[in-house]
């Protein structure tokens, strides 16, 4: 699996009137809850790796010992486990590069070490030649690394015995192929469940950051909006990991017979996640523009803050559409379009009230933020299951008329 990150820490605030001891105890409890939750999340995400590695090692040893007649097939299970670990979150091409790199390093090392012997300069020469061969094969970084690393192991840890060359070469190749087969065919990941778990560290902090942004806008707190913007920016690496998880899941449903039946559902889910990610990038643009608006002392109507709150709520509602209880996506659509309507109200002419000078008018940055908001809402509507034209028509009609209604074909779940 991809993603090295863990779920964000959402610790409960400590009451302001609590004693120092109470605050320390509450802080320790919050950190403990976060630590336990993070480890549970990691086990759910990576637990299958242990099963895959164990199955691959057992099969590789059995094939090496029983079919290849190798009394000590060490390289077969070693390579199998390495391939299983490397294939978690990488594409098939990169995994094959790892396998080819191991085999190439073995071939070069076994061919040259009986001629040169073992030593410092011999090790350097073998590594240089192994990497040169990998470069000539147009290999990527994984192939170069594995070829050089395996050549080092052969040059430093193994005696240059010619008659062992073929068994080691074959052991590595068989072990790598078994590891690849186990990871993609025999014990494949559950595609949609894996992607959902990778989405948790993206969606949870994103929803919290949007609610924090709305609260900061109501207080006209520039520091709060900057913090929310930074929180949204910090999601970039997590969204990259989520994209890698989607690629790995798509690869599994193409190659694993056990997962072929999930191709259609994963395709829909993948489209939804991609548009959800685009919406979060749009929300980041909204936060950036509204932060600039506060910095320039532009008015931010209360309707805009309410719209951001409602958009964050719609993201949470959309999450429930992929859970076993399957929430109705029309509820999320209503929330999104109501948020668009609120932004439209924020763009209306100002009400002449000297006691409320910042009520119903947006400045330059605020107007740009309104456009970015509608783009984000459009992507969320597509994530809910509407097609592109249908979502665009609903957003445009809502923004132009200050209201919305469902067309007959748009009310489907």
Image (cartoon, rainbow, N blue to C red):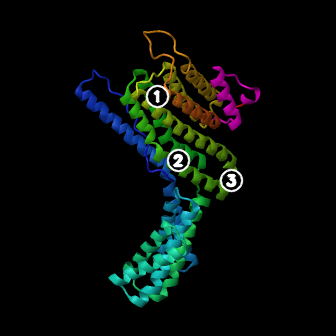
State the CA–CA distance, disc 3 to disc 1.
39 Å
Which residue lies most toward the bottom here? 115
Residue under label 2: 242
Residue 132 is situated, as x and y percent measured from the top left of the image, at: 48, 77
Task: Return the residue nearer the eye: 69 or 135.
Answer: 135
Q: Earlier in the sequence, mark 3 or mark 1?
A: 1
Labels 3, 1: front one: 1
Cβ atoms at labels 3 and 2 below 8 Å apart: no
State the CA–CA distance, disc 2 to disc 1.
22 Å
Residue under label 1: 211
State the CA–CA distance, disc 3 to disc 2.
21 Å
Which residue range is magenta in the image? 384-411
Please tell me whether residue 395 belongs to the stretch shown in magenta.
yes
Residue under label 3: 260
Location of residue 127 with respect to 10 vertically, above or below? below
Q: Is residue 130 left or right of residue 251?
A: left
Q: Earlier in the sequence, mark 2 or mark 1?
A: 1
Labels 3, 2: front one: 2
The mark found on residue 244 in the picture is none
Residue under the point 67% across and 22% down: 404
Location of residue 369 with respect to 127 vertically, above or below? above
Please tell me whether residue 338 belongs to the stretch shown in magenta.
no
Q: Is residue 16 left or right of residue 173?
A: left
Q: Earlier in the sequence, mark 3 or mark 2?
A: 2
Q: Where's the C terminus, which quadrant?
A: top right
For the stretch drawn in magenta, what is the main secondary structure? Answer: helix
Task: Return the residue nearer the eye: 253 or 338.
Answer: 338
Task: Return the residue nearer the eye: 58 or 116.
Answer: 116
Residue under the point 49% across and 47% down: 44
| Disc 2 crowd, CA 10 A, few/some/many (<14, 14-19, 20+) | many
């Amino acid at each position: 699996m991809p993603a090295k990150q863990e779920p964000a820490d959402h610790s409960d605030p400590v009451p302001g009137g609590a004693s120092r001891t109470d605050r320390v105890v509450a802080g320790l409890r919050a950190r403990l809850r976060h630590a336990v939750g993070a480890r549970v999340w990691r086990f759910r995400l990576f637990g299958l790796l242990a099963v895959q590695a164990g199955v691959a090692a057992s099969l590789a040893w059995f094939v090496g010992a029983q079919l290849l007649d190798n009394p000590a097939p060490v390289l077969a299970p070693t390579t199998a486990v390495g391939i299983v670990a490397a294939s978690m979150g990488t594409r098939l091409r990169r995994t094959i590069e790892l396998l080819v790199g191991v085999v190439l390093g073995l071939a070069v090392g076994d061919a040259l070490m009986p001629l040169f012997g073992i030593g410092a300069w011999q090790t350097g020469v073998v590594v240089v030649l192994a990497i040169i061969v990998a470069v000539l094969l147009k290999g990527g970084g994984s192939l170069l690394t594995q070829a050089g690393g395996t050549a080092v192991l052969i040059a430093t840890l193994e005696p240059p015995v010619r008659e062992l060359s073929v068994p080691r070469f074959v052991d590595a190749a068989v072990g790598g192929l078994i590891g690849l087969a186990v990871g993609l065919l025999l014990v494949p990941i559950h595609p949609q469940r894996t992607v959902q778990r990778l989405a948790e560290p993206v969606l949870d902090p994103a929803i919290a950051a949007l609610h924090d942004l709305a609260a900061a806008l109501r207080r006209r707190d520039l520091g709060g909006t900057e913090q929310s913007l930074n929180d949204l920016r910090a999601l970039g690496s997590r969204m990259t990991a989520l994209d890698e998880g989607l690629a790995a899941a798509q690869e599994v449903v193409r190659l694993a017979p056990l997962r072929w039946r999930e191709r259609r559902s994963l395709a829909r889910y993948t489209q939804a996640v991609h548009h959800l990610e685009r919406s979060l990038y749009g929300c980041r643009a909204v936060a950036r523009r509204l932060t600039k608006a506060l910095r320039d002392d532009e008015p931010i109507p209360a309707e805009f803050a309410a719209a951001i709150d409602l958009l964050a709520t719609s993201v949470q509602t959309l999450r429930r559409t992929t859970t076993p209880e399957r929430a109705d996506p029309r509820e999320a659509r209503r929330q999104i379009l109501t948020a668009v309507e609120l932004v439209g109200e924020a763009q209306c002419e100002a009400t002449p009230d000297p006691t409320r000078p910042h009520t119903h008018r947006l400045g330059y940055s605020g107007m740009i933020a309104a456009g970015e908001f509608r783009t984000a809402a459009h992507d969320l509507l597509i994530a809910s299951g509407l097609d592109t034209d249908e979502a665009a028509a609903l957003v445009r009609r809502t923004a132009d008329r200050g209201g919305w209604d469902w067309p007959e074909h748009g009310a489907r779940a």
